Image (cartoon, rainbow, N blue to C red):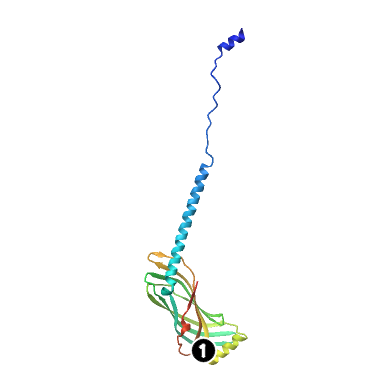
Amino acid sequence: MAEKQGHLNGAYYGPSIPPPQHYHRPGRGSDCGCCCLITLLLKVIITVAVLIGLFILIVWLIFRPINKVKFHVTDVALTQFNYTNNMLQYDLAANVTIRNPNKKIGIYYDRIQARAFYEDQRFGYQALTPFYQGHKNTSALNVVLKGQQLVTLQGEELTRFNQETKSGRYGITLELSLRIRFKLGKVKTARFKPKVECDDLMIPLNGDYVAGNNNKCKIKF
């Protein structure tokens, strides 16, 4: 009778309700981070590509055949070039003209270093004053190299020096080491470092220099 009564008085509310579950979408934050990172990388790549393209365009406009910047050695004076006991005593002065034929492009010469070589050995150095060269402009550099330098001439090198001493003309190379920037409107390119080589200048000792085909210098990047 007790068991029956307990059955009648017990309340029944149906099956128990499970606790609420909170669902989390895995990887949503990481996906957003990956997307942002990829977007940033794409923007950086596009920006770099545009800058490189602009730089190539400016260089092409300057150095294409019809608008190429030209370097020439116009005047040279060699008043001393003596070689004794591996010491070379020299007194050399040269004028180099730079022609910028471009209508809209200027050039910043941030560094200009002049060097002279004989038989591939350097014997003179001078740092020149930086300057800006405007559109369609011709500028002149005055290079003065004077002093003495340890130089070792042996074998064929010494033979050529003796032959050139008899002829009164010496094969000297003048080199300009540059650090330059180009300016197109308000845009300035990054700096880069070309070299200008004026090879095999047959310079007379205490005589007049005659500019020939070899007075045109080569630009190397």
Residue 211, quarter of the rendered image: bottom left
Give the image location of residue 219, x and y in percent: 48, 75
Q: Residue furthest right?
A: 155
The residue that mark 1 highlights is 169
> Which residue does the image show at 50% across and 51% down from the upper left?
38
Q: Is residue 71 above or below residue 204?
A: above
Residue 4 can be seen, yes or no? yes
Give the image location of residue 57, x and y in percent: 43, 66
Taking the image as shown, residue 86 lies to the left or right of residue 49, namely: right
> Which residue does the image show at 59% across and 11% down from the upper left?
6
Residue 86, quarter of the rendered image: bottom right
Q: Secondary structure at mark 1?
A: strand
Front residue of 35 and 107 = 35
> Which residue does the image show at 49% across and 45% down from the upper left?
32
Image quadrant containing the N terminus: top right
Q: Residue furthest front?
A: 65
Q: Is residue 172 above or below residue 5?
A: below
